[in-house]
Image (cartoon, rainbow, N blue to C red):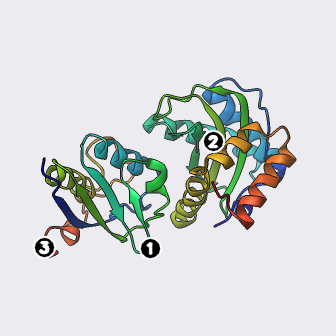
Amino acid sequence: MKFSDFVAVDAIRSDIDADNKPAVIREMAEALVEAGKIPPGELEGIVKAIMKREDLGSTGIGRGVAVPHTKHPSVDRLVGTVAVSRKGIEFESLDGEPVQLFFLLVSPPDRPGDHLRALENISRQLRDDEFCRRLKAAQTPAEIEHLLEEADHHGFVS
Amino acid sequence: MSQETISREVVVGIEQGLHARPADLLAREARKWQSRIELVGKAQRVDGKSILDLLTLAAEAGTRLVVEATGPDAREAVEAIGGLFDRNFTDQHNSQNNNQTNDTASGGRRQS
């Protein structure tokens, strides 16, 4: 699976305002609503479900990356978005580091394989230091989109 | 110091596959041991102590993997990690996957 298979480019955000976990999750979910990827009426339910998942254990998987996610019946295919926080947000990460790169995923309940393949793609690409560094430094959503495209087409070689 | 290598096959019994939370539990368990611990899938071999690596397995329900440990505590490490799979990763946290009838036997030690 590629980034372009699940990342809604209109919902990509660079330099988000949020400075805490619930706020960043809400900001990203709102971006998906604005991009027309999730119905406005489902926003609260989705934010709540993602927070509930975080309560089971942080999705801050280290290296300044978090993958907040949930299954939700309001989507019929996997949708996701990417956000970058310039300053980093405390996310109770596994390595204790603040998180700068967020990949938020909402998947249909009956498609666990797609969710796994999205996680596979994200984690494989983010093992690359150069890709991580450039994403964190991205100034605009267009720049983030371009980096994701580059990763989809060529991968990054460290 | 013994540098014994121990391995055993496990099967992913979790309905949603080896997703973020079980990968986290697995990496946490693996980091308790001195031995080098790797998970071997069909196409790749990854570091069992790295959640990022584990997620790249994209191991769906039913996937067979081999847990391989090399080092002074290899035997105990493989036993502990194998146990996580056997119990469907359910005993450490409440699981949304309330799967009581896990088919643990298929991943057991009978494999040669």
Q: Callout 3, which amino acid? A: Arg
User: Could you tell me residue B103's position as x and y percent?
Assistant: 24, 67
Which x, y percent locates residue A12?
79, 46
**Location of residue B53 in the rendering, given as x and y in whole percent from the top left corner:** 46, 54
Q: Is residue A35 visible?
A: no
Quarter of image, res A84:
top right
Label 1 vs 3, first from the N-terminus: 1
Q: Nearer the viewer, mark 1 or mark 3?
A: 1
Q: Quadrant of residue B102?
A: bottom left
Which one is in front in this view, the residue at disc 1 or the one at disc 2?
1
Q: Residue at x 65, y 58 (%)?
A: A157
- Residue furthest to the front in view is B1
**Where does the image place residue B42, in percent across and percent down from the top left?**
40, 74
Q: Where B79 sits versus A89, above or below?
A: below
Q: Is residue A100 left or right of residue B28?
A: right
Marks 2/3: CA–CA distance: 46 Å
Q: Which residue is mark 3?
A: B110
- Write down the residue under mark 2: A45
Residue drawn where x is 38% and y is 69% of the image:
B41
Q: Chain of mark 1?
A: B
Kind of residue sitting beneath label 2: Gly
Q: Is residue A153 above or below residue B91?
A: below
Residue picked out by circle 1: B43
